[in-house]
Amino acid sequence: MYDFNYTKPSSIPEAVKALGADMEAKALAGGQTFIPVLKQRLNKPSVIVDLSELGLKDVKADDKTVTIGAMSTHHQIESSPDVQRLVPGLAKMASLIGDTQVRHRGTMGGSLANNDPSACYPAAVLALGATVHTDRRSIAADDFFQGMFTTALEPGELITAIEFPRAEKSNYEKFRNPASRYAMVGVFVAKTAAGVRVAITGAGQNGVFRHTAMEEALSKDFSPDAITGITTPADGLNGDIHASPEYRAHLIGVMARRAVAAA
């Protein structure tokens, strides 16, 4: 690691002030991506602002929504009775992330702010039409994700909570890289009061995206058969040592049908 200063603010205003005081300051949430990056000397922050004392770990719910604090861990989310009841696909997603150690340290807010193209949570947020709340505004899911490792967050802006609508049906299926357990392809399907949405992660070169053809078909008939004949163009999909764009295009269909069947 490179040398850096370290601070652990006890309130959101203090954290925002610390991040805004230095353009090279970086926020630390669960650290499951950031700490390996520091160890490999791929980033050289002047100050690390530790967010662990800000709270932001509660899960609140009513009959229509569930709101998850940004610092809630994957384990908290997978084991929350409210998440299991209102958005079971999200609880399942959290249970599939990494391993036990990662699930007890990694946070939803950190994952969303980083917006790794293979991360799971962006697919849930986009498919469910969630709202990302920050220290200064609320951002709709369709406006939040803006490309690989890019979001609508402004410098120094902190995610405080993510609000999800109740899902009539929801499920997530992913084809995992056997080593990293990141999604080579992950598909989240959701039916809410606003309609049916399908989001794909792990496959697109620009990160998470919606599959409108599947959404239209499932809006008429929410069944695996409804999307059996729908193909996904390989153009714009990732290709690497793990899978070609064509193979990922095929996996999108397989994972989507499995997700709908389980939902």
Image (cartoon, grey):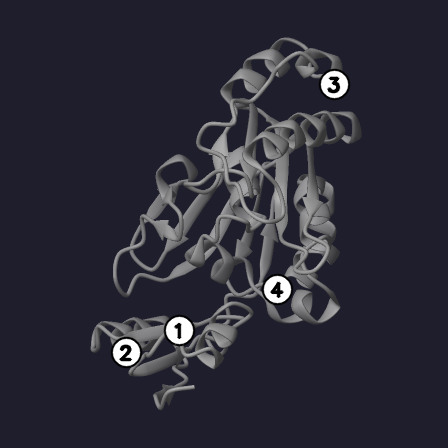
- Residue closest to the far front: 241
Where is the C terminus found, in terms of image quarters?
top right
Q: Nearer the viewer, residue 9 or 44?
A: 44
Can you tell which mark lies on residue 18?
2
Q: Nearer the viewer, mark 2 or mark 3?
A: 3
Mark 1 — residue?
42
- Residue closest to the far right: 262
Query: Is the residue marked by circle 2 packed among few (<14), some (14-19), or many (20+) residues within 10 Å?
Result: many
Q: Position of residue 87 (x, y in %)?
A: 66, 40
Query: Disc 4 on helix, strand or loop?
Result: loop
First reached walking from the N terminus: tag 2 or tag 3: 2
Q: Nearer the viewer, residue 59 or 7?
A: 7
Picture quadrant where residue 4 is located: bottom left
Query: Is the residue marked by circle 1 packed among few (<14), some (14-19), or many (20+) residues within 10 Å?
Result: few
Query: Disc 3 on helix, strand or loop?
Result: helix
Q: Can the viewer see residue 169?
A: no
Q: Amino acid at mark 2?
A: Ala
Can you tell which mark lies on residue 220?
none
Mark 4 — residue?
73
Separation of disc 3 and disc 1 at Cα? 43 Å
Separation of disc 1 and disc 2 at Cα? 22 Å
Mark 3 — residue?
224
- Residue closest to the far top: 220
> Which residue shows up at 48% across the image and 62% down it?
110
Q: Amino acid at mark 3?
A: Pro
Q: Nearer the viewer, mark 1 or mark 4?
A: 1
First reached walking from the N terminus: tag 1 or tag 2: 2
